[in-house]
Image: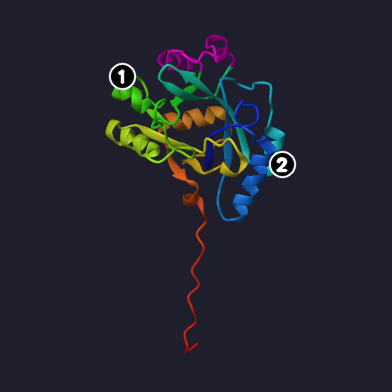
Amino acid sequence: MYIDMHCHSVSSDDSRAPVEQYLKWIQVLRRRGYRVDGIFLTEHRKFDGDRDYRELGQKYGVLVLKGSELDTRFGHFLVYNVTPALVSKVDFVDVAMDPFRLIAEAEACGALAVPAHPGRFGIGLCDFLSQGVPLGPIRVVERLNGSSRKGENERAEEICLSMGLAGIGGSDAHFVSSIGSCLTEFKCPVRDERDVVAALRSGQFRAVRLEETRESVPTVKPASSKD
């Protein structure tokens, strides 16, 4: 399955993309031969626990999952399988929270916190690591981010290779046509947020670009002049 692990709808303060418009654009991508099976809505500094996108997802044949993107002292973190217990323990609007506490609380609640766009200049994990901040328990980072500037994904790639980190992919879409630009390929079926966390912990995934999902077109061999 190919899932965009990082996107923002109008529920985020800096996005202009309604969820249904994302799903409609995915139909366009599919007609062009690309494959996008699901999206993860990671709204900024909040979790929309009261919003249910299952019926909308079924209408368009796209798995719509919900998570969060939270600010910490050492950059942004994507949080998957947000539970009521985690919401009660972590202040989602605290832009200076301790990332290691977030990771620990997420783990205890069955969730997973992953550094977003670690190569982003000024706010990415790479900058903090270069300043001597310990990697700690981090084992997965966002390796491909569709909104990164030149050199930023390369920095993320470098720490993945040098530190043995696994990497996911997400578009970081804030407007409709950027959805699906980067995705995560899962080797096993994913039905909900818990399945995603289980797959991320198993290591059975990889970051890909949209172009890598394009269905191959069989080559038609030209007829011989003797035929």
Crowding at dot 2, Cα within 10 Å, few <14 / some 14-19 / many 20+, comes out as few
Q: Which mark is residue 59?
A: 2
The residue lying at 50 percent from left, 59 percent from top is 216
Q: Nearer the viewer, mark 2 or mark 1?
A: 1
At which x and y percent is residue 69?
52, 24
Q: Which amino acid does label 1 sit on?
A: Pro
For the residue pair 35 and 180, the one nearer the viewer reads as 180
Residue at 53%, 31% in the rendered image: 195
Judging depth in this view, the residue of 136 and 221 nearest the camera is: 136
Name above or below for residue 93 compared with residue 64. above
User: Dot 1, how many residues are within 10 Å of its Cα: few (below 14), some (14-19), or many (20+)?
Assistant: few
Label 2: state its secondary structure. helix
Residue that badge 1 annotates: 134
Tell whether position 46 is magenta: no
In the displayed structure, would residue 165 be above or below residue 137?
below
Q: Where is residue 113 in the image (x, y as percent from the top left)?
A: 46, 23
220 or 40, which lies in front?
A: 40
Which residue does the image show at 50% across and 47% down from the upper left?
Answer: 210
- Amino acid type, label 2: Lys
Is 20 on the left-hand or right-hand side of 201? right
Horizontally, residue 44 falls left or right of residue 149, namely: right
Quarter of the image for residue 137 reads top left
Q: Check if residue 89 falls in the magenta segment.
A: yes
Relative side of 202 to 41, left or right: left
Residue at horizontal 62 percent and vertical 46 percent from the top: 26
**Mark pair 2, 1: CA separation:** 45 Å
Could you say which quadrant of the image residue 180 lies in?
top right
Residue 156: image tag: none
Residue 43 x/y as whole percent: 58, 26
Residue span colored magenta:
84-109
